[in-house]
Structures are given as structure tokens and as C-alpha cells.
Image (cartoon, grey):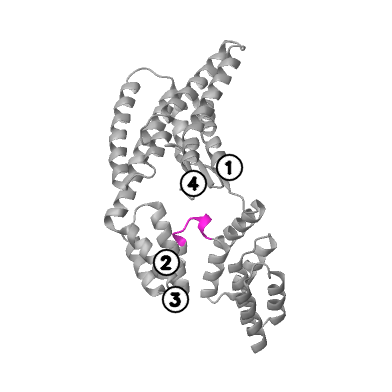
Amino acid sequence: MVWKLGAIELASELARGDGRPRLRFGMSLGFVLLCASVGSTHGFSGSVAALLALGSVLATHEVPRALVCRAYGVSCKVALTASGGLLEREPASMGRLSRFLVATIGAVANGSMALVLHLVARRLSAAPEELLGVLSKLHVAWAGLSLLPLSPFDVGKALLERAAPETRFTFSVASSMLVVAVAAGVLSVPLEPLFIGLCGLVLFAAAHAVVESYRDFSDVRSGALQRARDAELALDAGESRRAMGLARAGLEIALAKTVRERLHRTLAWAAIAESDPFAAHLALQGLPPESRDVYLVASYLTTCNRTEEAVALLESARGVGHRSRETTKLLADLLFRRGDREAVHGLAEADRNLLSQADLDAIQGALAAE
């Protein structure tokens, strides 16, 4: 099963990281297609050159931002997309200084790279000098854009990060109208293909900002965000059936990715608590791979009466170095159901430091009663 393999891969990654924040990188098909269309006038080599040039601009900008996040203990994902570089932080909340660094260090990196390229170009022959000159200008342009206080760009997004959803949506629409007007004027004059590609990234970024801010605003106005909170509170209170109802009602109207993920996760755990494998399966399908961890997948397998698969999954996670109180307790319960008392005793001894005294007493009590 893909879910089991993904859970083991995630467990292995967490074990190797030893609890440190993770960095992940990706590239969307939309970005590749944009670069291909920009360089298509020069054939396949032109498309590859556009991919490398625009990719280097975005990577130079986003990698230092990701490293700052990691330095502050925040896991993140960098993706090169048709709307520019996207940095998704987990968790999204950061302090004022760290947010300022994340908003500005990308521009510093692009500006520094532009200076290096300019100095190198002065020492080369005409053809490489021209190419490096264009690339240097791209870095300068992207650095300047990122410092604008408009919502598609780093500084603008940082200013609005803690604003109300309605404010973010209004500002995003106004910013995007201004960006489109300026981009239309720029595109009306002859440009290098790579600068046309840069304008394309800016226009897609503006559209993306409007769509995302609208989704956040819509979820507040429709009550989807409140339903996500209420469902989580109901689940914590042990009211799993009510949590399922709230989560399902929220999923009918929720638009934002983060809200839908919260609702799917709550629905999955509530369905597991209610021993409803079909609802749990549908909820897990709605989660991104990085949210389907070992504990969740093993709990789902248990609900499906696939006990041996759940045991194998938990033991495989232990084999790659991943251990937690929750997974140990679940494994002990499954081994106890299987009647493997020696394995339960050995597990309790091996993970004594992970378990509370109440957990150990419960395990010893169950073994003695047996």
C-alpha cells in the first residue's frame, strides 16, 4: 500500500533528522511548461536554458529563506512553480525578527548573485558576457520585486501575514490590479524572452495571491474555519461522532488547503474512534502524504481489522529508528490482542523511557490479569 510506504519513508526521514526541522524541495509541472514556452523560439535548447535561468533565480531567492526557517526550528517546503518560488512553513507562525529575515534575505541573495555574475561577465568574451549580463539583470529584477510592499511579493506577504482574512483579500485584489497594469505596460515593449518569463511569474503570483486570500476569507465568512476548530475540540473531548459531523459539514464548504487538511485529519481520527474504516479511508485520501504518519496509518489498519499489517508497519518504523509514546502504546495493544505476552513485556522494557509510569502500570496490570 502506498500509504504504508509513505509512512515508513516519513518515519525514516524523521528518525534521520533526529527531531531537527526538515527541508523539502519540489518543482511543479506549471513552472516547467512556462519555461518551455518562454524558450520555445530557440527550440529545445532554449527551453532548457530558460528552465535553468529562471530556476536559478528562484532557487537563489528561496534557498536562503528556507535555511533561515530551519535555523529558527521551522520545517518548510520550497517549490518552484509558475507563480514563482513558494515557501510553505510548518508551522506558519514565526517571530518578528525571523519573519523580517525570511522576507528580505531572498532579495539580498539575488542581489549578491547579480553582482557576482556582473563581475564574472566583465572578464569573459562577448557571448558569455551577454548571457551572464541578462541573468544578472534577472536577479536584480527579482530582488527588487520581492521588496515591494505588494501581496504577491515577500515583503507584502510578510506585512499581511497576521492581518484579518478580509484585509488580506482586499489588499491582494488591489495589489494584483496594480501588478497587472504595470506588467501590461512592460510587455507592450520588446523584451528578452527570459524577461517575458519573469513577467509571467509575476502575473501568476498575483493571481495565486488573490485566489489563496479569497479561500481564507471565504472559510472565515462561511464558518468552515470555525467548524474545523469545533471538530477538533469535540474530538479532544471524546465526542467522536459529533466531530465527524462537524468535519463533514466543514468539508462541504471549506476552500483553503490548510483548513481542509485539518478537517480531513479530524475526520480520520474521529472515524477511527468510531471504528468506521470507510469514513477513515476517505479522510486519509484527502490528506497530503506528509500528514499520513505511521501512527495514523497503523490506527487506520487496526480499524480495518488488518492487525498483522499494523504490527508490521509499526515494527518497520521501529526498524528505521522511529519511536514515540503513541506508536509504542498502539503496538503494545496490538501485540497483547495477538496474545504475544513476551513481546509486550520486551516492548515495555525497551521503551520504558518513552512511556509514563501510568502506561507501564497499565501494561503490567494487563499482563498480570492475563
User: Circle 2 sits in a helix, a strand or a loop, which is it?
Assistant: helix
Q: Tell me the distance, in whole angstroms, between the alpha carbons under discs 4 and 3.
A: 32 Å
Find residue 267 and name its label. 2
Front tag of 1 and 3? 1
Q: Nearer the viewer, residue 57 or 309?
A: 57
Residue at mark 3: 274
Give coordinates of residue 253: x percent, y percent.
31, 58
First reached walking from the N terminus: tag 2 or tag 4: 4
Residue at mark 1: 71
Residue at mark 4: 89
Please, what is the three-letter code of the amino acid marked with disc 4? Answer: Arg
Please, what is the three-letter code of the amino acid marked with disc 1? Answer: Ala
Give coordinates of residue 345: x percent, y percent.
70, 78
Residue at x-position 27% and y-position 54%: 221
Left or right, 341 with respect to 257, comes to: right
User: Circle 1 sits in a helix, a strand or a loop, which is it?
Assistant: helix
